Amino acid sequence: MTDDPTAQARAWRRELHQHPGIAFDVEETADFLSGVLAGLGWRVHRGIGGHGLVASTRRGSSMRAIALRSDMDGLALDEATGAGYSSRNAGVMHACGHDGHMAMLLGTAAALVAADDDFDGTVHLVFQPAEEPGLGALAMIADGLFDRFPVDAIYGLHNLPGIPAGHIHTRGGAIMAAEDDFEIRIHGRGGHASMPHLVIDPLVIGADIVSSLQTIVARSIDASRSVVVSCTEFITDGARNAIPGEVIIRGDTRSFTAEDSRLVERRIRTLAESVAAAHGATCDVEYTREFRPTVNDPGRNRVVAAAASAALGASAVDADCAPRMASEDFGEFARVVPGCFAFLGTGTVVGEGGTPLHSRDYDFNDDVLEAGIAFYLQLVRSELPPTAP
Ligand SMILES: [Zn+2]
Ligand SMILES: [Zn+2]
């Protein structure tokens, strides 16, 4: 440990960065977190939802408790940052900044230990695996997370390139969208490319379906609401001179309400089946729900806004930012206990904190560790105020 808390958090972040894991495969990460937190005197509980872990500390006599949550997993990408502390695990890297999220909680843990009597109650640090596939939060909840560690509120931060470094953006209500996936399998009849009158061409039908799906947002959704329908894959079993017999179209939709999600599913099924039928083909549609929306509790949102303003200055805070169409596993926690999720800006210039998430050259901007830790410390003091001496 060094005496400079930000330098220490930076060192932890870079250590975590070198040993990323994917989804539930984060044992190395859990080992490291567990070692640091136990060394700081926190009680560490491992093996919750796979390699998820909770570190707890209690002070004073209050029964109030809050959770601060970080994700643990990286992505299946080959790192191209060129950093001296690049990933040592081939084909895996922290391209979403979850290493930075973990380091901010470790820095907060260290600072809370150093400040002896600064809060009254219990703080649980929740580290979840498998945020990227949207499975880790549910796994921890199913494993009894909130039964074993009851809390009055849960909070989380995600770093976000495109927002000025050290700024916090949040909002009451839905802040991140639900993500649904779909697969449309069109069954036609393939044949010789020179004799199309003898086939039922699923490729032409598929093109028609892709076009028709564009009308869902344009013509079926109330224009005041936000929905996205994207086709992302178009796969055929044809060859250059053979018309395919089957086409698979895959895609992804985003929405903020269960009502819109159901409407999108209904329209995809109707459009795909009727366009296929009009051309003498059949199709099967599979529709699955991957992430539910992240919805912030309005009261917890006010707590976050006040804590962020106190820690970072009011000019660094937007408490009513626009919602994002991306999706986040934090929403599962916030369905069970009141919660608030916020974005921590990492910078607006590419290469200086503004490189987009999930890029091979993305590297968490260590300069915002200090702001994240200051925010978390203020949040703990606001939610678990120290008793008057
Ligand atoms: Zn991500
Ligand atoms: Zn992420």
Image (spheres, grey):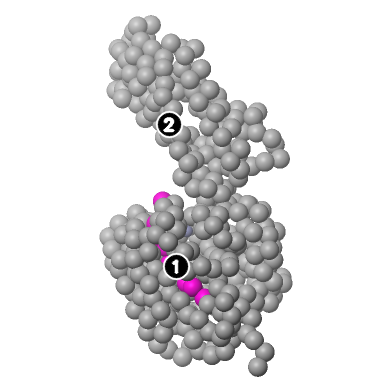
State the residue position of label 1: 148
Q: Secondary structure at mark 2?
A: strand
Foreground mark, 1 or 2, reads 1
User: Would you say the beta carbon of the disc 1 residue lies within 8 angstroms of ligand 2?
Assistant: no
Q: Does label 1 or label 2 sit earlier along the sequence?
A: 1
Q: Is residue 196 visible?
A: yes
Residue 359 shows in this picture:
no
Quadrant position of residue 143? bottom left
Query: Where is residue 113 shown, x and y percent of the image?
Result: 49, 86
Residue occupying the point 61% across, 43% down: 257
Q: Is residue 94 magenta?
A: no
Secondary structure of the residue carrying tag 1 is helix
Q: Which of 363/40 is in front?
A: 40
Of residue 216 and residue 238, the one placed in the foreground of this image is: 216
x%, y% of residue 26?
33, 63
From this view, report whether residue 348 is shown above or below residue 370. above
User: For this rendering, which residue is in front, 157 or 348?
Assistant: 157
Neighbourhood count class around disc 2 (C-alpha, 10 Å): few under 14, some 14–19, many 20 upward: few
Q: Amino acid at mark 1?
A: Arg
Image quadrant where one finds the C terminus: bottom right
Residue 211 position by quadrant: top right
The residue pinned by badge 2 equals 286
Q: What residue is drawn where x is 45% and y is 38%?
A: 288
The magenta stretch is 123-133
